[in-house]
Image (cartoon, rainbow, N blue to C red):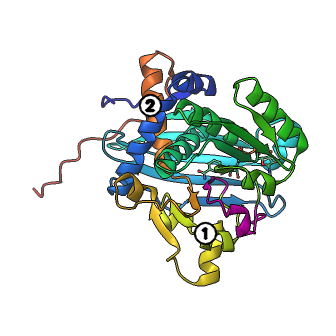
Protein backbone atom coordinates (compact mmCIF):
# COMPACT_ATOMS: atom_id res chain seq x y z
CA UNK A 1 0.00 0.00 0.00
CA UNK A 2 1.26 3.49 -0.78
CA UNK A 3 1.89 5.93 2.08
CA UNK A 4 -0.27 9.06 2.29
CA UNK A 5 -3.96 9.13 3.14
CA UNK A 6 -4.84 5.54 4.10
CA UNK A 7 -7.60 3.99 2.02
CA UNK A 8 -10.35 1.76 3.35
CA UNK A 9 -12.40 -0.64 1.25
CA UNK A 10 -15.35 -2.93 1.81
CA UNK A 11 -15.53 -6.32 0.06
CA UNK A 12 -18.94 -7.98 -0.22
CA UNK A 13 -19.64 -11.70 0.06
CA UNK A 14 -20.49 -11.74 -3.65
CA UNK A 15 -17.03 -10.38 -4.52
CA UNK A 16 -15.39 -12.88 -2.15
CA UNK A 17 -17.24 -15.75 -3.85
CA UNK A 18 -16.23 -14.48 -7.30
CA UNK A 19 -12.59 -14.23 -6.19
CA UNK A 20 -12.54 -17.81 -4.84
CA UNK A 21 -14.77 -19.58 -7.37
CA UNK A 22 -12.94 -22.43 -9.11
CA UNK A 23 -9.71 -21.69 -7.23
CA UNK A 24 -9.94 -24.51 -4.67
CA UNK A 25 -6.53 -26.13 -5.48
CA UNK A 26 -4.82 -22.72 -5.24
CA UNK A 27 -6.59 -22.05 -1.92
CA UNK A 28 -5.37 -25.41 -0.55
CA UNK A 29 -1.79 -24.43 -1.54
CA UNK A 30 -2.22 -21.02 0.09
CA UNK A 31 -3.49 -22.59 3.32
CA UNK A 32 -0.53 -24.98 3.29
CA UNK A 33 1.89 -22.06 3.03
CA UNK A 34 0.08 -20.27 5.89
CA UNK A 35 0.55 -23.38 8.07
CA UNK A 36 4.21 -23.44 7.09
CA UNK A 37 4.63 -19.75 8.04
CA UNK A 38 2.88 -20.47 11.34
CA UNK A 39 5.11 -23.48 12.03
CA UNK A 40 8.21 -21.46 11.14
CA UNK A 41 7.33 -18.77 13.70
CA UNK A 42 6.41 -16.07 11.15
CA UNK A 43 2.98 -15.46 12.66
CA UNK A 44 1.44 -14.04 15.82
CA UNK A 45 -1.76 -15.85 16.76
CA UNK A 46 -2.95 -15.07 20.31
CA UNK A 47 -5.76 -17.10 21.89
CA UNK A 48 -9.25 -16.56 20.44
CA UNK A 49 -11.58 -14.53 22.65
CA UNK A 50 -15.10 -15.93 23.19
CA UNK A 51 -17.99 -13.52 23.84
CA UNK A 52 -20.87 -15.54 25.34
CA UNK A 53 -24.40 -14.61 26.38
CA UNK A 54 -25.92 -15.88 29.66
CA UNK A 55 -29.43 -15.71 28.14
CA UNK A 56 -28.38 -17.54 24.91
CA UNK A 57 -25.91 -20.22 26.07
CA UNK A 58 -25.59 -21.91 22.66
CA UNK A 59 -24.54 -18.71 20.88
CA UNK A 60 -21.18 -16.91 20.81
CA UNK A 61 -19.08 -14.40 18.92
CA UNK A 62 -15.35 -15.13 18.65
CA UNK A 63 -12.53 -12.62 18.04
CA UNK A 64 -9.41 -14.01 16.37
CA UNK A 65 -6.60 -11.42 16.11
CA UNK A 66 -3.53 -12.42 14.12
CA UNK A 67 -0.52 -11.23 12.17
CA UNK A 68 1.30 -12.96 9.33
CA UNK A 69 4.71 -11.91 8.00
CA UNK A 70 6.28 -13.33 4.82
CA UNK A 71 4.45 -12.82 1.55
CA UNK A 72 1.09 -12.32 3.35
CA UNK A 73 2.42 -9.34 5.37
CA UNK A 74 -0.90 -8.42 7.02
CA UNK A 75 -2.34 -8.13 10.50
CA UNK A 76 -6.03 -8.24 11.28
CA UNK A 77 -9.04 -9.51 13.17
CA UNK A 78 -11.69 -12.09 12.36
CA UNK A 79 -14.97 -11.50 14.21
CA UNK A 80 -17.25 -14.50 13.75
CA UNK A 81 -20.68 -15.13 15.26
CA UNK A 82 -22.26 -18.54 15.76
CA UNK A 83 -26.01 -18.53 16.45
CA UNK A 84 -27.22 -22.12 15.82
CA UNK A 85 -30.90 -21.13 16.28
CA UNK A 86 -30.63 -19.07 13.07
CA UNK A 87 -30.92 -22.29 11.05
CA UNK A 88 -34.52 -22.91 12.19
CA UNK A 89 -35.35 -19.43 10.86
CA UNK A 90 -33.76 -20.08 7.47
CA UNK A 91 -30.56 -18.11 8.17
CA UNK A 92 -27.07 -19.65 8.22
CA UNK A 93 -25.61 -20.25 11.68
CA UNK A 94 -22.38 -18.30 11.20
CA UNK A 95 -21.76 -14.70 10.07
CA UNK A 96 -18.41 -12.94 10.02
CA UNK A 97 -16.30 -9.98 9.02
CA UNK A 98 -12.54 -9.82 8.61
CA UNK A 99 -10.55 -6.60 9.14
CA UNK A 100 -7.15 -6.34 7.46
CA UNK A 101 -4.52 -3.98 8.94
CA UNK A 102 -1.41 -2.54 7.30
CA UNK A 103 1.55 -3.92 9.31
CA UNK A 104 3.62 -0.70 8.80
CA UNK A 105 1.05 1.84 10.02
CA UNK A 106 -1.48 -0.30 11.86
CA UNK A 107 -4.27 1.29 9.81
CA UNK A 108 -7.11 -1.03 8.84
CA UNK A 109 -7.41 -1.03 5.05
CA UNK A 110 -10.29 -3.40 4.35
CA UNK A 111 -13.38 -5.05 5.82
CA UNK A 112 -14.39 -8.28 4.07
CA UNK A 113 -17.51 -10.39 4.41
CA UNK A 114 -15.93 -13.45 5.95
CA UNK A 115 -18.33 -16.37 6.36
CA UNK A 116 -17.25 -17.57 2.90
CA UNK A 117 -13.55 -16.95 3.69
CA UNK A 118 -13.95 -18.87 6.95
CA UNK A 119 -15.78 -21.81 5.33
CA UNK A 120 -13.23 -21.90 2.48
CA UNK A 121 -10.15 -21.88 4.72
CA UNK A 122 -11.74 -24.54 6.95
CA UNK A 123 -12.52 -26.76 3.98
CA UNK A 124 -9.09 -26.18 2.43
CA UNK A 125 -7.44 -27.09 5.73
CA UNK A 126 -9.57 -30.28 5.96
CA UNK A 127 -8.71 -31.24 2.37
CA UNK A 128 -5.01 -30.57 2.99
CA UNK A 129 -5.09 -32.72 6.13
CA UNK A 130 -6.93 -35.50 4.28
CA UNK A 131 -4.35 -35.45 1.48
CA UNK A 132 -1.40 -35.51 3.90
CA UNK A 133 -2.83 -37.84 6.56
CA UNK A 134 -4.73 -40.18 4.26
CA UNK A 135 -2.08 -40.59 1.57
CA UNK A 136 -0.48 -43.99 1.15
CA UNK A 137 -3.20 -45.62 3.22
CA UNK A 138 -5.54 -48.37 2.13
CA UNK A 139 -8.75 -47.54 0.26
CA UNK A 140 -10.14 -44.17 1.40
CA UNK A 141 -13.07 -43.86 -0.99
CA UNK A 142 -16.02 -44.10 1.41
CA UNK A 143 -16.39 -40.63 2.91
CA UNK A 144 -19.05 -39.96 5.55
CA UNK A 145 -20.33 -36.56 6.70
CA UNK A 146 -21.85 -36.22 10.19
CA UNK A 147 -23.59 -32.83 10.36
CA UNK A 148 -24.66 -31.56 6.97
CA UNK A 149 -24.45 -27.76 7.10
CA UNK A 150 -22.35 -25.23 5.21
CA UNK A 151 -19.00 -26.60 6.40
CA UNK A 152 -19.71 -30.15 5.17
CA UNK A 153 -20.82 -28.69 1.82
CA UNK A 154 -17.55 -26.75 1.49
CA UNK A 155 -15.44 -29.73 2.60
CA UNK A 156 -17.07 -31.91 -0.05
CA UNK A 157 -16.35 -29.22 -2.69
CA UNK A 158 -12.69 -28.93 -1.64
CA UNK A 159 -12.11 -32.70 -1.41
CA UNK A 160 -13.69 -33.08 -4.85
CA UNK A 161 -11.54 -30.28 -6.31
CA UNK A 162 -8.45 -31.91 -4.77
CA UNK A 163 -9.26 -35.10 -6.70
CA UNK A 164 -10.32 -37.20 -3.71
CA UNK A 165 -11.10 -40.78 -4.91
CA UNK A 166 -14.72 -40.91 -3.66
CA UNK A 167 -16.43 -44.26 -4.12
CA UNK A 168 -19.46 -43.55 -1.90
CA UNK A 169 -20.61 -40.57 0.14
CA UNK A 170 -22.43 -41.15 3.43
CA UNK A 171 -24.59 -38.53 5.07
CA UNK A 172 -26.02 -38.28 8.58
CA UNK A 173 -27.55 -35.39 10.51
CA UNK A 174 -29.72 -35.28 13.64
CA UNK A 175 -32.26 -33.32 11.59
CA UNK A 176 -33.80 -35.64 8.98
CA UNK A 177 -34.63 -32.68 6.72
CA UNK A 178 -30.98 -31.63 6.64
CA UNK A 179 -29.83 -35.19 5.84
CA UNK A 180 -32.35 -35.22 2.97
CA UNK A 181 -31.35 -31.75 1.75
CA UNK A 182 -27.61 -32.57 1.63
CA UNK A 183 -28.28 -35.96 0.01
CA UNK A 184 -30.27 -34.25 -2.76
CA UNK A 185 -27.61 -31.53 -3.11
CA UNK A 186 -24.88 -34.17 -3.56
CA UNK A 187 -26.93 -36.29 -5.97
CA UNK A 188 -27.38 -33.20 -8.12
CA UNK A 189 -23.59 -32.78 -8.37
CA UNK A 190 -22.05 -36.21 -8.56
CA UNK A 191 -22.59 -39.67 -10.05
CA UNK A 192 -20.94 -41.26 -6.99
CA UNK A 193 -23.54 -43.15 -4.88
CA UNK A 194 -24.83 -41.09 -1.94
CA UNK A 195 -26.27 -42.97 1.04
CA UNK A 196 -28.25 -41.42 3.91
CA UNK A 197 -27.58 -43.08 7.29
CA UNK A 198 -30.04 -43.13 10.18
CA UNK A 199 -27.31 -43.31 12.81
CA UNK A 200 -23.78 -42.03 13.38
CA UNK A 201 -22.65 -45.57 14.29
CA UNK A 202 -23.68 -47.07 10.94
CA UNK A 203 -22.07 -44.20 9.03
CA UNK A 204 -18.79 -44.41 10.98
CA UNK A 205 -18.55 -48.20 10.64
CA UNK A 206 -19.03 -47.88 6.87
CA UNK A 207 -16.66 -44.94 6.19
CA UNK A 208 -12.93 -44.72 5.52
CA UNK A 209 -12.97 -40.97 6.10
CA UNK A 210 -15.36 -39.51 8.69
CA UNK A 211 -16.05 -35.76 8.72
CA UNK A 212 -17.59 -34.30 11.89
CA UNK A 213 -19.12 -30.87 11.18
CA UNK A 214 -21.92 -30.69 13.75
CA UNK A 215 -22.88 -28.10 16.33
CA UNK A 216 -22.58 -30.58 19.21
CA UNK A 217 -21.43 -28.87 22.41
CA UNK A 218 -20.23 -32.07 24.06
CA UNK A 219 -19.20 -35.57 22.96
CA UNK A 220 -22.01 -37.70 21.55
CA UNK A 221 -19.89 -40.53 20.09
CA UNK A 222 -18.13 -42.58 22.76
CA UNK A 223 -17.51 -46.16 21.61
CA UNK A 224 -13.96 -46.76 20.25
CA UNK A 225 -15.31 -50.02 18.76
CA UNK A 226 -17.10 -48.01 16.03
CA UNK A 227 -13.59 -46.99 14.79
CA UNK A 228 -12.02 -50.48 14.83
CA UNK A 229 -11.41 -50.27 11.04
CA UNK A 230 -9.15 -47.20 11.69
CA UNK A 231 -10.70 -44.44 9.58
CA UNK A 232 -9.23 -40.99 9.08
CA UNK A 233 -11.42 -38.64 11.15
CA UNK A 234 -11.61 -34.95 10.26
CA UNK A 235 -12.90 -33.65 13.59
CA UNK A 236 -13.76 -30.16 12.39
CA UNK A 237 -16.43 -29.46 15.03
CA UNK A 238 -13.97 -30.52 17.75
CA UNK A 239 -16.41 -31.68 20.46
CA UNK A 240 -18.02 -34.82 19.03
CA UNK A 241 -15.89 -37.72 20.29
CA UNK A 242 -15.22 -38.96 23.81
CA UNK A 243 -11.90 -39.07 25.64
CA UNK A 244 -11.76 -42.86 25.08
CA UNK A 245 -11.78 -42.34 21.31
CA UNK A 246 -9.15 -39.58 21.56
CA UNK A 247 -6.90 -41.87 23.62
CA UNK A 248 -7.42 -44.73 21.15
CA UNK A 249 -6.32 -42.57 18.16
CA UNK A 250 -3.29 -40.87 16.69
CA UNK A 251 -3.99 -37.19 17.35
CA UNK A 252 -2.91 -34.44 14.96
CA UNK A 253 -3.84 -30.83 15.74
CA UNK A 254 -3.21 -27.49 14.02
CA UNK A 255 -1.74 -25.82 17.14
CA UNK A 256 -1.40 -27.53 20.51
CA UNK A 257 -1.97 -24.43 22.68
CA UNK A 258 -5.06 -23.39 20.74
CA UNK A 259 -6.64 -26.79 20.40
CA UNK A 260 -6.36 -27.82 24.04
CA UNK A 261 -8.81 -25.13 25.12
CA UNK A 262 -12.55 -24.39 25.22
CA UNK A 263 -13.59 -27.94 26.14
CA UNK A 264 -12.72 -29.51 22.81
CA UNK A 265 -12.52 -33.30 22.96
CA UNK A 266 -8.72 -33.12 23.18
CA UNK A 267 -9.00 -30.53 25.96
CA UNK A 268 -11.45 -32.77 27.88
CA UNK A 269 -8.94 -35.60 27.46
CA UNK A 270 -6.11 -33.50 28.86
CA UNK A 271 -8.32 -32.65 31.86
CA UNK A 272 -9.06 -36.36 32.35
CA UNK A 273 -5.50 -37.72 32.09
CA UNK A 274 -3.53 -34.68 33.31
CA UNK A 275 -1.04 -34.56 30.41
CA UNK A 276 -0.78 -33.93 26.66
CA UNK A 277 1.25 -36.95 25.63
CA UNK A 278 -1.67 -38.27 23.55
CA UNK A 279 -1.14 -35.41 21.03
CA UNK A 280 1.24 -36.95 18.50
CA UNK A 281 1.89 -34.11 16.06
CA UNK A 282 0.83 -30.83 14.52
CA UNK A 283 -0.16 -30.62 10.87
CA UNK A 284 3.05 -28.63 10.37
CA UNK A 285 5.08 -31.62 11.65
CA UNK A 286 3.33 -33.80 9.09
CA UNK A 287 3.81 -31.26 6.26
CA UNK A 288 7.52 -30.95 6.99
CA UNK A 289 8.17 -34.69 7.33
CA UNK A 290 8.68 -34.51 11.10
CA UNK A 291 5.95 -37.08 11.77
CA UNK A 292 4.81 -40.07 9.78
CA UNK A 293 1.25 -41.24 10.40
CA UNK A 294 1.01 -44.97 11.18
CA UNK A 295 -1.23 -46.96 8.83
CA UNK A 296 -2.79 -49.16 11.51
CA UNK A 297 -4.36 -46.56 13.80
CA UNK A 298 -7.40 -44.28 13.68
CA UNK A 299 -6.13 -40.79 12.86
CA UNK A 300 -8.03 -37.91 14.48
CA UNK A 301 -7.34 -34.46 13.01
CA UNK A 302 -8.61 -31.66 15.28
CA UNK A 303 -8.07 -28.15 13.85
CA UNK A 304 -8.97 -25.34 16.25
CA UNK A 305 -9.02 -22.97 13.28
CA UNK A 306 -6.27 -20.37 13.25
CA UNK A 307 -6.85 -16.68 12.54
CA UNK A 308 -3.68 -16.70 10.43
CA UNK A 309 -5.49 -18.85 7.85
CA UNK A 310 -8.30 -16.28 7.53
CA UNK A 311 -5.75 -13.48 7.17
CA UNK A 312 -3.80 -15.31 4.48
CA UNK A 313 -6.97 -16.02 2.49
CA UNK A 314 -8.44 -12.55 3.18
CA UNK A 315 -5.28 -10.85 1.87
CA UNK A 316 -5.46 -13.05 -1.26
CA UNK A 317 -9.14 -12.11 -1.81
CA UNK A 318 -8.30 -8.42 -1.31
CA UNK A 319 -5.56 -8.56 -3.95
CA UNK A 320 -7.85 -10.43 -6.38
CA UNK A 321 -10.64 -7.86 -5.91
CA UNK A 322 -8.15 -5.00 -6.34
CA UNK A 323 -6.96 -6.59 -9.60
CA UNK A 324 -10.55 -7.09 -10.80
CA UNK A 325 -11.57 -3.51 -9.88
CA UNK A 326 -14.12 -4.85 -7.36
CA UNK A 327 -13.01 -3.00 -4.22
CA UNK A 328 -15.55 -0.52 -2.88
CA UNK A 329 -13.40 2.26 -1.39
CA UNK A 330 -15.07 4.35 1.33
CA UNK A 331 -14.25 7.96 0.57
CA UNK A 332 -13.08 9.91 3.65
CA UNK A 333 -13.22 6.88 5.98
CA UNK A 334 -10.22 8.26 7.89
CA UNK A 335 -10.98 11.96 8.27
CA UNK A 336 -8.86 13.25 11.17
CA UNK A 337 -5.36 13.09 9.68
CA UNK A 338 -3.89 16.48 10.68
CA UNK A 339 -0.77 16.37 12.85
CA UNK A 340 0.84 19.45 14.37
CA UNK A 341 4.47 20.23 13.42
CA UNK A 342 7.32 17.76 13.08
CA UNK A 343 8.56 15.04 15.42
CA UNK A 344 12.17 16.34 15.70
CA UNK A 345 13.41 16.34 19.31
CA UNK A 346 13.20 19.73 21.05
CA UNK A 347 16.53 21.61 21.36
CA UNK A 348 17.36 23.58 24.50
CA UNK A 349 18.27 27.17 23.41
N1 LIG B 1 -12.38 -26.06 13.38
C1 LIG B 1 -12.62 -25.05 12.56
O1 LIG B 1 -11.71 -24.41 12.05
C2 LIG B 1 -14.04 -24.71 12.22
C3 LIG B 1 -14.29 -23.67 11.29
C4 LIG B 1 -15.61 -23.40 10.94
C5 LIG B 1 -16.65 -24.12 11.54
N2 LIG B 1 -16.36 -25.06 12.47
C6 LIG B 1 -17.43 -25.80 13.14
O2 LIG B 1 -18.07 -26.63 12.19
C7 LIG B 1 -19.39 -26.93 12.68
C8 LIG B 1 -20.39 -26.91 11.54
O3 LIG B 1 -20.55 -25.61 11.03
P1 LIG B 1 -21.76 -25.31 9.97
O4 LIG B 1 -21.63 -23.87 9.60
O5 LIG B 1 -21.77 -26.33 8.91
O6 LIG B 1 -23.01 -25.47 10.94
P2 LIG B 1 -24.55 -25.71 10.55
O7 LIG B 1 -25.36 -25.22 11.70
O8 LIG B 1 -24.81 -25.17 9.17
O9 LIG B 1 -24.66 -27.30 10.47
C9 LIG B 1 -24.45 -28.13 11.58
C10 LIG B 1 -25.32 -29.36 11.43
O10 LIG B 1 -24.97 -30.27 12.47
C11 LIG B 1 -26.16 -30.96 12.85
N3 LIG B 1 -25.93 -31.59 14.15
C12 LIG B 1 -25.84 -31.00 15.38
N4 LIG B 1 -25.57 -31.94 16.32
C13 LIG B 1 -25.48 -33.13 15.67
C14 LIG B 1 -25.21 -34.46 16.08
N5 LIG B 1 -24.97 -34.75 17.38
N6 LIG B 1 -25.20 -35.44 15.15
C15 LIG B 1 -25.43 -35.16 13.84
N7 LIG B 1 -25.69 -33.91 13.38
C16 LIG B 1 -25.72 -32.91 14.29
C17 LIG B 1 -27.22 -29.88 12.84
O11 LIG B 1 -28.51 -30.44 12.74
C18 LIG B 1 -26.82 -29.08 11.60
O12 LIG B 1 -27.49 -29.54 10.44
C19 LIG B 1 -19.65 -25.92 13.81
O13 LIG B 1 -19.52 -26.57 15.06
C20 LIG B 1 -18.52 -24.91 13.67
O14 LIG B 1 -18.17 -24.32 14.90
C21 LIG B 1 -15.08 -25.38 12.80
Residue furthest out toward the left? 349
Q: Assess whether residue 234 is covered by the magenta stretch.
A: yes
Using the rendered image of the protein, determine whether residue 335 is visible from the camera's viewpoint: no
Q: Which residue is mark 2?
A: 26
Where is 150 relative to 161, above or below? below
Q: Position of residue 2 (x, y in %)?
A: 31, 28
Q: Is residue 221 above or below residue 88?
A: below
Task: State which region is magenta.
Answer: 217-237
Q: What residue is rendered at 39% in x and 59% in y?
A: 285
Q: Position of residue 99 (x, y in %)?
A: 52, 40
Q: Are marks 1 and 2 in contact (CB under 8 Å)?
A: no
* Location of the C terminus (image quadrant): bottom left
Magenta-highlighted stretch: main secondary structure? loop
Q: Judge by depth and name the residue closer to the eye, 157 or 17.
A: 157
The structure residue drawn at horizontal position 88% and vertical position 42%, both measured from the top left corner, is 88
The answer to whether mark 1 is within 8 Å of ligand 1 is: no
The residues tagged by marks 1 and 2 sit, at their Cα atoms, a distance apart of 31 Å
Residue at label 1?
A: 266
What residue appears at the point 47 percent right and 15 percent down from the top-left corner?
325
Task: Please state the horizontal and vertical placement of residue 151, each as a whole percent of the image.
Answer: 67, 42
Q: Residues within 10 Å of mark 1 (few under 14, many from 20)?
A: many
The answer to if 98 sits in the magenta stretch is no
Q: Is residue 258 left or right of residue 182?
A: left
Q: In percent of the image, x 72 and y 67: which residue is there?
A: 225
244 or 261, which lies in front? 244
Disc number for residue 228 = none
Instruction: Locate residue 185, reporting x and y percent.
Output: 77, 28
Amino acid sequence: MSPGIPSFAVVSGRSVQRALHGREPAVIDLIESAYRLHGAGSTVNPPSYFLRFPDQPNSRIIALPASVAGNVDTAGLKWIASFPDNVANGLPRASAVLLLNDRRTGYPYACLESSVISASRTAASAALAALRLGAGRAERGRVGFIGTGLISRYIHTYLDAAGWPFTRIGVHDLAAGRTRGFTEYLRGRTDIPVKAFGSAEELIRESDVVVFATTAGKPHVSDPGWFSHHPLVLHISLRDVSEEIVLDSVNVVDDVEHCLKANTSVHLTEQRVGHRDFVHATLHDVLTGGYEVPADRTVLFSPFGLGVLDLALGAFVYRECLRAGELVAIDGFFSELETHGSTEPATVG
